[in-house]
Amino acid sequence: MDLTYTAEQELLRKTVRQFVTDRVTPERLAEIADGPDGWDPGLWKETVELGLTSVSLPEELGGAGLGFVEEAIVAEEFGRGLFPGPWLGSVLARPALTGHVLQAVAAERHVTTLVGLTAPLVAEGSAVTGRADHVVDLAAADLLVVLTGEGVFFVDRDETDWRLLPTVDGTRRLGQVALESTPAARVSGPDPRLAQQIRTRAHAALAAEAVGVASGAVEFAVEYAKERQQFGRPIGSFQAVSHQVADAFMDAELARSLAMWAAAAVDAGDTTAPLAAATAKWFAAEAAMRATERAIQVHGGIGFTWEHPLHRFYKRALWIASQFGTGAELRARAAASLLR
Amino acid sequence: MNVQDGPAEAEFRAGVRAWLAENLPPGWGTPEWRWPEDRVGFLKDWSRRLYDGGYAGLAWPEAYGGRGAPLPLQAIAYEEFARADAPDHVGLIGIGMAGPTIISAGTDEQKARYLRKILTGEEVWCQGFSEPGAGSDLASLQTRAVPDGDGFRITGQKVWSSFAHIADRCILLARTDPAAPKHDGITYFLVDMHADGVEARPLRHMTGDAEFNEIFLDDVYVPREDVVGEVNRGWQVAITTLLHERGSTAFFLLGRLDVRFRRLLQTVRSLRTDGRVAADDPLVREAVARAYADLQALRFTSWRALSDMVRSGMPGPEGSIIKLQWSEANQRLTRLGLDLLGPDAALWPGGHDSWQWQQLRSHGNTIEAGTSEVLRSIVAERVLGLPRSR
């Protein structure tokens, strides 16, 4: 058992943090979040070129050849700086794509996302029919990876009837896709384990992202509580304030421990991975919500404004909590496995 | 990062399991088990067995009777002892607090004189820090030690001292310079509980048990060689003790929570006297999943703290939150266990294994070894760097 990061992993974290800090300033974040489709193709191109979308891709396919722990480090740092880009869609689609397909997707600079995880679509020959709600990264993804009862298919997004939905978190819009005998290219045959694999990776990645969101919020709260003066003292010297910040920090650290467990279990292909990832996901989502709520409270009036970035952190936390299984759903599933 | 045992860890774990299978007291863990009349004698015998097997003070240096094992093996041993729900060593204060303090700040004579007997269970230790007027503000303590010949005479009152009624020795703080600022006039003593003038009076806590005591000291002579560190520099030594109290016991505490969680699963599955099974209730299932997350979050936070210690030699920030989170998680878990009993929750079956007893006892956990409020302030001020509140 070893729950530390290697020097290389710490370096990766530093690189991602620096990149997000430089490129995603509060002003830029606001522009993207309040813009028409919630992403920035130029920023995404840089992200791809820096290799941040291919850390776990094998080296012979142009990736860094690292594992899921490294993917989780990227996810956490993206959460910490609220990186607005379509990385989640590619994390979701990854287990459905094999080596040479992945290589082609990367070579042609496609942005992918996954459709059909909740309810598989229907394939007939090389056409797919069905409808999916709550699809992520639809504005950016030109290539849809579609799960059907007959296996995995590629569909050109623009062959479908798709639209973005107004979404609370402006940097992570949800969309709707409708396919009606839409032309599709078969990627692989049915695999009964695939949906669970995708779900587990999604849970582990979102747990890491939520830890980042929580830590980002804690940092805002700590800085503000040190600076803001009332009654002639920094408000952080009042225990009613400082204990809230301490609680937010501890929530974030407990969530981090679970997220590290989940990422390592996914990497090792451990049988506990689905339970670990689901537990980490709901716990970290709650930690992120509580941390952002407390950070907003500690900021007082300024924390309630549109101008301050905290509401965007809060909205990301709400997004994570609501997608890929709510806390209540994931806890019900965990209980079923614990009480088997 | 790796959440599985390495080869050496797996081999060690198998060794602990085999040892436990062979050495646990006959009948232990079965419904037929009955504690003997002489509980302390039984635990001393068990402690000797642990020592002979090499499981007392596993991570202590070999020179002092330990095995010099790396910290992760100590953690694995705690995990396995918890899995077997094995009896505790009789010398919890000695192993967790007195011993580590003597190892880090004691003289060679003190090490030779005291350490091995802690591990064998021959000498039981207690802690004389808190006083009626000095709880969270420990440094305001008033027990006085005045020089007398080649030693000191100590007079005062201590409180909340677990095991003092059976203890042979006490780690004790007393004021040696009343004129100095409060942190600078304290000295750290090793007091003989059998000396003239020492009296331990049991205090019953809300379970009805007399687990801890008041200690009255009336002109008790303590020789100079039983001072740890320098005279008037005892506060720094006490910090070492408190760090050990809050730090090294993580896996011990975790083990207890682990045992209770497994009991909780049993309670949830079993038929209540009113004919219901708690596992059928979705709200109970929800609470079980939350308790599981609490347990696992603490487990991996403890492993993170340990991994940091192994790698850097310094505890990371996560170490400071374990005791606080554990004590609150333990309250939630035991409260859930109690709720599950339905109308039987109001009955008092006695016995430390009952949810009734455990739930009441859990209220000590958020007070002893640093109240939750003090620990939150430590996190806020020392970990997060927020301004001091006082």
Image (cartoon, rainbow, N blue to C red):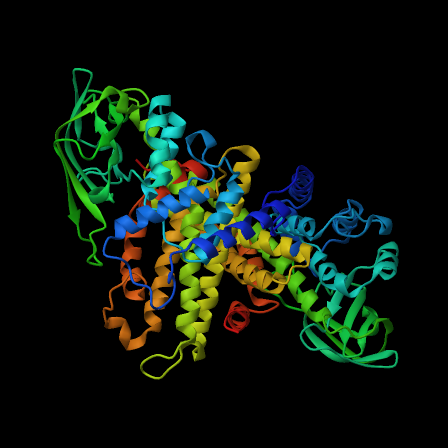
Q: Residue at x 84, y 73 (%)?
A: A159
- Which residue in the rendered view is the most extreme toward the top? B149
Taking B95 as reference, is A128 left or right? right
Quarter of the image where one finds residue A90: bottom right
Q: Report how many numbered discs are placed on residues in the image.
A: 0
Residue nearer the viewer, B54 or B125: B54
For residue B214, side relative to residue A220 (left or right): left
Q: Quadrant of residue B190?
A: top left
Q: Nearer the viewer, residue B190 or A239?
A: B190
Spot occupied by residue B273 in the image (x, y as percentages of width and height): 31, 81
Residue shown at 42% from the left, 31% from the top = B64
**Image x and y of residue B84, in percent:** 44, 58
Image quadrant where residue B197 sits:
top left
Q: Please name the residue shown 40% across and 29% down the image.
A: B103
Q: Is residue A1 visible?
A: no
- For the C terminus of chain B, which image quadrant? top left
Instruction: Find residue A221 and report its horizontal and vertical position in percent.
Output: 47, 45
- The picture places residue A183, in percent across and down from the top left corner, at 87, 76
* On screen, residue B44 above or below A39: above
**Against A27, is A312 above or below?**
below
Q: Nearer the viewer, residue B193 or B208?
A: B193
User: Would residue B181 be seen by someone viewing this image from the given angle?
Assistant: yes
